[in-house]
Image (cartoon, rainbow, N blue to C red):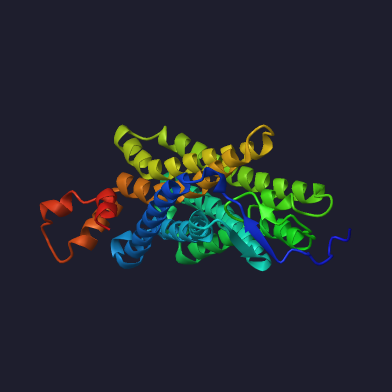
Amino acid sequence: MNNTQPSSVAFFILQGLGSLGEKRMVLFVIFLLAYTIILGGNSMIIYLVRTDPKLGSPMYFFLHHLSFVDMVYTTVTIPNMLSGFLTDLKTVSFPGCFLQMYCFIHMATTGRALLTVMAYDRYVAICNPLRYTTVMTRPVRLLLIVGAWTFGAFFTLPAITMATQRSYCGPNVVRHCWCDPSSLRVLVCGDTQVENMVSLSSAVISLLTTGLLILISYILIVMAIAKMGTTQRLKAFTTCVAHLTVVSISYTSASFVYISYRVGNISPEVRIIVSVLYSVLTPFLNPMIYSLRNKELRDAIKRAFCPHTDILPQGCKTLNIMSWHKTH
C-alpha cells in the first residue's frame, strides 16, 4: 500500500486506562492534584525569575525556561488524560493526534536539552568563575535557548513527518492515554520497520547526546572541585545538587520508559502507567527540588509573599514551596 495514501481513519479512540473501572476516579483526583501543583509550582518559578532582580543570573534564566517547557509538556497530555477518566469514550481528531504527539516529543527532547544547557552553565560557573559573566552574556544565553528548542525540533520532525504520511485503516483504538508514537504505529496499514528505526534512533541519540554532554560537564566540575578547599567545595556542590537531582530523576525515569517498550512480556497497562508517571514525575518534582535546595529561590519566595518588610515575620521565615502548595 502506498505510504502517502490518505488515511481512512478520521479520528482515534484513546483507550487509556479504561480497564481499571471505578479506580479511574481515584487516578483522576491524584493526577488533577499533581497537575495543579505542576502549574502552580512552575508558574511561581517563572513569576519569581521575571520579577525578582536578585534572580537575574543565567542559572535562573535557564530554570524559568525549563519550567515553561514542563508546563507545556504536561498540558499537552494530562488534561486529555483527565477527561478520559471521566468518559467511557475519548476521541481525538486525526490532525489533533499528531499535533499532540509532536508537542509531547518536542517538549520532552527540549527539556533534556535545557538540562544540558544548565549543566554547561554550572561548568562555566565553577570551572571558570572569573570569566562567567563575560561568557554567559545575554546573547549567549538566548543562543543556548534557541539551540535547545532547535535540538528538540530536529529530533522530533523526522519521525512525526513519516507518521503523518502513513495510512491508518483501523482499528482506530489507541491503547494509551494520549497519541503515543509506539501505540499509534501498530495501527498503520503496512510495514513500519523504517518508522521504528527512525523513531528509536532519534530517541536514543537525543538521550545519549544530552546525557553524555551532562556527564562530561560534571566530570570536569568534579575535577575542579577536587582542587578546592573544603568551604569552596561545599559551596560548589550546593549550586549543583538541585540540577543533578533533577537530571538523575529525568534520565532514570526515561530509561524505564524505553525499557518497558522493548520488553515484550510487559502488559500494555503497565507501559501506560510507566509512561504517565514519567510524564508527570519530573515536572512535578522540579519546583520542589529547586526551591527546597536553593536558598536564593527560597528567599525570593519569602520576598514575594512578604513584600516591603525589612524584618520578615516568623510565618514568612518558615515559608517554602510545600506550604505554598498547601495554601493554594
Quadrant, the C terminus: bottom left
Quadrant, the N terminus: bottom right
Where residue 194 sits in the image (x, y, percent)?
Answer: 81, 49
Q: Is residue 302 above or below residue 247?
A: below
Where residue 283 sits in the image (x, y, percent)?
Answer: 45, 51
Q: Is residue 13 above or below residue 197?
A: below
Please report the residue visible at 36 percent of the width from the left and 41 percent of the height from the top: 236
Q: Is residue 204 above or below residue 226?
A: below
Please report the residue visible at 31 percent of the width from the left and 32 percent of the height from the top: 230
Where residue 269 sits in the image (x, y, percent)?
Answer: 58, 41
The quarter of the displayed image where residue 68 is located: bottom left
Residue 39 or residue 271, whichever sits in front:
271
Report the side of 129 relative to 198 (left or right).
left
How many numbered marks are there? 0
Where residue 114 sits in the image (x, y, percent)?
Answer: 51, 54
The quarter of the displayed image where residue 275 is located: top right
Can residue 218 be seen here? The reply is yes
Please report the residue visible at 45 percent of the width from the left and 57 percent of the height from the top: 62
Residue at the outermost right position:
1
